[in-house]
Image: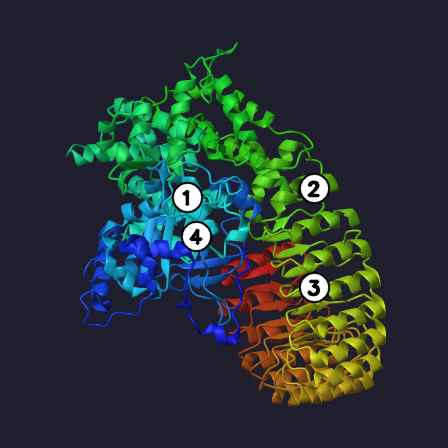
Amino acid sequence: MRKQEVRTGGEAGQGHGTGSPAEQVKALVDLLAGKGGQGSQALQAPDRTPDSPLGPHHNDLRIQRHREALLSRAGGGREPGSASPRLPTLLLVEGLTDLQLREHDFTQVEATRGRWRPARAIALDRLFLPLSRVSIPPRVSVTIGVAGMGKTTLVRHFVRLWARGQVGKDFSLVLPLTFRDLNTHEKLCADRLIRSAFPHVGEPSLVLAAPARVLLILDGLDECKTPLDFSNTVACTDPRREIQVDHLITNIIRGNLFPEVSIWITSRPTAAGQIPGGLVDRMTEIRGFNEDEISLCLEQMFPEDQTLSGWVLSQVRADRALYLMCTVPAFCRLAGSVLGYLCRNRPGAQDAELWPPRTLCELYSWYLRMAFSREGQEKGKASPRIEQVAHGCRKMVGTLGRLAFHGLVKKKYVFYEQDMKALGVDLALLQGAPCSCFLQREETLASSAAYCFTHLSLQEFVAAVYYYGASKKAIFDLFTESGVSWPRLGFLTHFRSAAQRAMHAEDGRLDVFLRFLSGLLSPRVNALLAGSLLAPGEHQGYRAQAAELLQGCLRPDAVVCARAVNVLHCLHELRHTELACSMEEAMERGALARLTGPLHRATVAYLLQVSDACAQEANLSLCLSQGVLQSLLPQLLYCQSLRLDANQFQDPVMDLLGSVLSGKDCRIQKISLAENQISNKGAKALARSLLVNRSLTSLDLRGNSIGPQGAKALADALKINRTLTSLSLQKNTIGPVGAQRMADALKQNKNLKELMLSSNSIGDGGTKALAEALKVNQGLESLDLQSNSISDSGVAALTGALCTNRTLLSLNLRENSISPEGAQALAHALCTNSTLENLDLTANLLHDQGAQAIAVAVGKNRALTSLHLQWNFIQAGAAKALGQALQLNGSLTSLDLQENAIGDEGASAVASALKANTALTALYLQVASIGIPGAQALGEALAVNRTLEILDLRGNAIGMAGAKALASALKVNSSLRRLNLQENSLGMDGAICIATALSGNHQLQHINLQGNHIGESGARMISEAIKTNAPTCTVEM
């Protein structure tokens, strides 16, 4: 896109100058004033006084007449008392993606899963304003949106609002034109363009207003009858010279004509690619519906019946492919109208198995039946049976089908009366209600009628129905009408021709046409249209062979392109779904390794788009080779989350993935490459992609071998990257040097929230470097340093950082070599730090002395919520200290003391704290040498405590007596949700005590009684007792 010039500070507050403008601008003012060559002189003349007959007040009246004329043309104002429409929001985008340039509109929505690329939103009322104080307004603005997104609606909405003075107040004139209007001319000059379209503004007085800005709107570039050719168009600077319309438009866009007039062009994305990016100052995209807006749209369609709108929404959500397409407003309304019709007019017994629709062709076939049903209702008759509308259907398809098909082949989407006559269309037939559901008529400014299908997909559907019928008797190629007979005639020959042409169409314009053509062979569609358009059962002779033909279109060892994925969509329309179902099951089981043929790969790509299982995360672990991955790359671009673990990928694959992540189209937010064979070269390839990628938020490289050099490359990328928030580098042997590089990056990066470096042998040196970074970094929230040979000196550096850092929430130091001295340093930091919430010191060397120091800090700390002290040689003394701390602490919710020999004395101390503590919700005391006294103390505490939800006592020796104590507590306790008594020598009697106690406890959700020598008969008895006493509780025995 064109870089706009930047004003200096002094220029930023100024509008356009009042000096002598370019000759072309004078010419525009001349023609608006109707004064020919005198316009430039008038423009430079001093303003008339207010009392002049042609003064500013008179100009205001003329402009008001122009506004009224636009309101009348655009549909007038809203109804009295109706709510003011919400201004639509557009997305600022940086040019067109490859997908938008090359693919069908449906493919664009499906490939991106209905998600819109991250972009800055801009309100309609700011569309033509500078984005900053030092920028200038755009001259050429382009707004794109797939068919049915509401581009023309948006333009009309803007024109109405401008005419009312609500938006675009800096424009003196807004001149809206459509390409439907422009198509009626072969040649035009700029002068005649404005005069013919807006004759009422050609008054001499308008020139005196000296408009600062004029906006020329060109709506619907995709409907222009001649493609714009910017490379071969001769420059024209004379506004009175007649040239071809497409040449006129290119000269206006280039600025050869009207260089200071603002231009707003709307278009489907593919057609917008005709305009060189260097000529576009601002590109915006209309965002489709999100989930809430789909629901709101359907609710507004049936405001009188919430039950009906709820049913329609549930049916839309039941099929992911249809639901994705409902992000397009026009499609959402079409689907809603069909489903609403079906619910209100329940099909008879013969049609009961044909609804609700589950494919595009089924949906549009019901739409066809609905159209003819409404005709009967309008005439005051009962809804006609399908036999009664057979003649009308055939006549309409014969009339519109040829028009639709030949328009599709020639990329023609707007038709005029001469087109109708050339194709033998009966204009009288277009007045009927069924035709109005498919074709709409619009008056052009040249007082001639323009016709277009109400949505592109309806043109494709009618074209497919026409082709289906014509191909059964045609003896020539319907795409060329060459008149040359083929050796073998019949439907399948023509079907093969259509499939081949669709596969070779670079812009995918025949993709949906081929889907509809395939869908007409499905049993359900045949039953729907039998007797009207299709012969009953005729699909049976073609269906299997058509499926074979479609599968034969897939080339071996080729990249899975959009055309290949469309083959799977066609098979789905054909209701040939066995392969897709089996592949989906294999994907869920992780059994795709041997399914590597072209059809299998295309099916995987198809499932990535439409499968509910792949919607949140596409799991392709343990199943891909480099070759298969390479063929799938174009389809992986749009996965939200991609898991590629344990695929034995090496560095060359990272070059491929790096190219994907570097692409402008890339939408991948999370990618996991854990447990592969990536070295520093592969890490460097990924790092290069991070320099330009704007979508990735999480990168998981754990279990590879990137080493210090790989860490350095990623660290250098982090200094520039602004989107990555999570980086996992566990088990990558980055060492102290790699940790140092990461620390350097953290000093500059403000976006990374989570950094996992466990099992990397970074030692005290790497830890000290990271500690220095934490003193500066104010973005990191979670740091994982598990198993890194960190001793007290490294911990001392970290504690110094914790005293100043205010963002770190979680610190994992498990499996290091922290002694009581290191624990004391940490305790000092905890007394100062007010943000750390999770501290994991599992499997260190704290002993009682260190744990006691931590306990004292917990008594003072008000931020920590989770503390892990498992396997630290802690005994009763430290447990007592922790018990005292719990009586003071009001923030800790989880305490882990498992595998520490705190004994009954320590358990009793913690139990005593539970009687007063109201914050702790989880207590882990596995393998803590707790016997009967400790269990009895805990039972007494549970009878009083109202907050503890999880108690884990696995691997102790509480016996039957301890079980009885806990059972007594369970009868009155109302907070406990999970209780683990595994391996506690309860015996059958102890287990029965627990089971019977549950009759008064309806809060416990899970209990584990495994390893307690209950026996099979005892297990059955206890299971029955628990089912009776606590049916919602899950028991493990």
Residues at marks 2 and 3, CA–CA distance in whole angstroms: 24 Å
Quadrant (top left/top right/bottom left/bottom right) for the N terminus:
bottom right
Q: Earlier in the sequence, mark 2 or mark 3?
A: 2
Q: Position of residue 636 (x, y in %)?
A: 62, 46
Tell me the mark number nearer the camera, choosing from 2 and 1.
1
> Which residue was labeled with disc 1?
248
- Residue ranking furthest to the left: 380
Residues at marks 2 and 1, CA–CA distance in whole angstroms: 45 Å
Tell me the mark number nearer the camera, choosing from 1 and 3.
1
On screen, 672 above or below 879? above
The residue that appears at 70% across and 41% down in the rendered structure is: 630
Amino acid beneath label 3? Leu
> Which residue was labeled with disc 3?
727
The residue that appears at 28% across and 26% down in the rendered structure is: 386
Q: Earlier in the sequence, mark 2 or mark 1?
A: 1
> Which residue was labeled with disc 4?
288
* Observer-nearest of 905 and 193: 193
- Neighbour class for label 3 at 10 Å: few (<14), some, many (≥20)? many
Q: Quadrant of residue 513?
A: top left
Amino acid beneath label 1? Leu
Q: Earlier in the sequence, mark 1 or mark 3?
A: 1
> Which residue was labeled with disc 2?
630
Q: Quadrant of residue 534?
A: top left
Q: Position of residue 304 (x, y in %)?
A: 24, 53
Amino acid beneath label 4? Gly
- Neighbour class for label 1 at 10 Å: few (<14), some, many (≥20)? many
* Observer-nearest of 45 and 235: 45
On screen, 504 above or below 888? above
